[in-house]
Image (cartoon, rainbow, N blue to C red):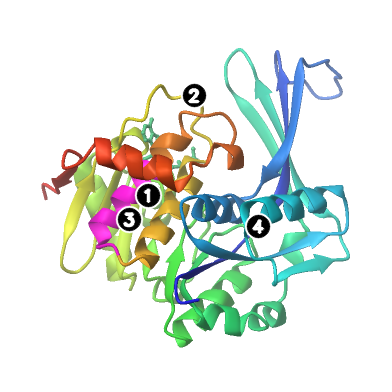
Amino acid sequence: NHNRITVLGSFVADLAFRVDRLPARGETILGPSFVLGPGGKGSNQAVAAARSGGHVSFITKLGRDPFGDIARKLYADEGIDTGHVYEATVPTGAAAILIDAASGDNAIIVVPGACFTITTDEVDAARELIAGSSVLMAQLELPLEIVEHGLALARSLGVATILNPAPAAALPEHLYQLADYITPNESEAEALTGVAVVTLADAERAADVFLARGVKNAIITLGAQGAFVKNATMSAHVVALDAGAVVETTGAGDAFNGGLAVALTEGLPLEAAVRFGCATAAISVTRPGTAPSMPHRAEIDCLLASHAGTTTQPATA
Ligand code: ATP
């Protein structure tokens, strides 16, 4: 399928505990609520892309355990191809997320587990799949050598690559040359370029650093300010869309990347593709949760139609 999107990334089970305050060392406290759900940036982005209209395959590795089964059921429900979801001998990863209900502060432990044991041979086994895709999308929640291997394979096959550099990690210079699109948020852009992104001019300076390193298209997401996009021939500030009251922004970046991948696969011009990503994310922030908050295509089209012609501004360089 020429419109296929292949995501190479992580799955972990998110265990979110709401507490009245974070516990001190050695202390046990009772909390009011607990939610278990699917997480991991790769998995969230695969769900976002599938719901926003993409034909999605996900390459990851899961344990043979109940957390792995949560992922398998999710992909079955969302129509995500799992032909290259491998089985690990170690348990599926998990994130313990402690949320201070009063302040909103959190403390998080992520154990990547099974997905982190994926091998370069297993990536190579997906060669045919990647060759038949129009986009390969990866994040930084797998070992760097795996990410690099996947991007290099896609590039060698003439398949466009999206690198969402999250969570931020120091990247070797040649990795940038393997990215057709890079999609950091403000803090990731700062960590990778040294440019503190506060204003649009800052976003442009950070984008210029990525372009100078060999990225073809730099897209910096700016939270409620939307996104800034630049390549050799254009730059634009795409304003965020308003889809209603903001409930929870967790997963906004994942929604953006999933939507962006779909729009690029469908051949939208870059600025319109970024706008589609912003629309996908704008709806996700009006809902609780990460994967469950991802919108379906009809909702995105409806939001875009209601904002027609009002949300893109040329960058003021
Ligand atoms: P998170 O870590 O919360 O998942 P992120 O930090 O990776 O998100 P952001 O830059 O905060 O990513 O947001 C990604 C995209 O989501 C933005 O480009 C924007 O289009 C959209 N977005 C974020 N916050 C809002 C908001 N309050 N209103 C509308 N759109 C938003």
Q: Position of residue 2 (x, y in %)?
A: 45, 77
Residue behind mark 1: 277
Q: Quadrant of ligand 1?
A: top left
Q: Is residue 222 visible?
A: no
Secondary element type, mark 2:
loop
- The residue lying toward the viewer, choosing from 298 and 92, is 298
Q: Is residue 90 left or right of residue 55?
A: right
Mark 2 or 4: in front is 2
Mark 3 or 2: in front is 2
Kind of residue sitting beneath label 2: Val
Mark 1 or 4: in front is 1
Residue extent of the magenta highlight:
268-280
* Pointer 1 or 4: first along the chain: 4
Q: Position of residue 204 (x, y in %)?
A: 22, 52
* Pointer 3 or 2: first along the chain: 3
Kind of residue sitting beneath label 1: Gly
Q: CA distance from mark 3 to mark 2?
A: 25 Å
Q: What crowding class fits label 3: few (fewer than 14 Cα within 10 Å), some (14-19), or many (20 or more)?
A: many
* Pointer 1 or 2: first along the chain: 2
Q: CA distance from mark 2 to mark 4?
A: 25 Å
Kind of residue sitting beneath label 3: Ile
Callout 1: CB less than 8 Å from ligand 1:
yes
Residue behind mark 2: 247
> For the view shown, which residue lies furthest in the bottom direction?
156
Residue behind mark 4: 10
* Pointer 3 or 1: first along the chain: 3
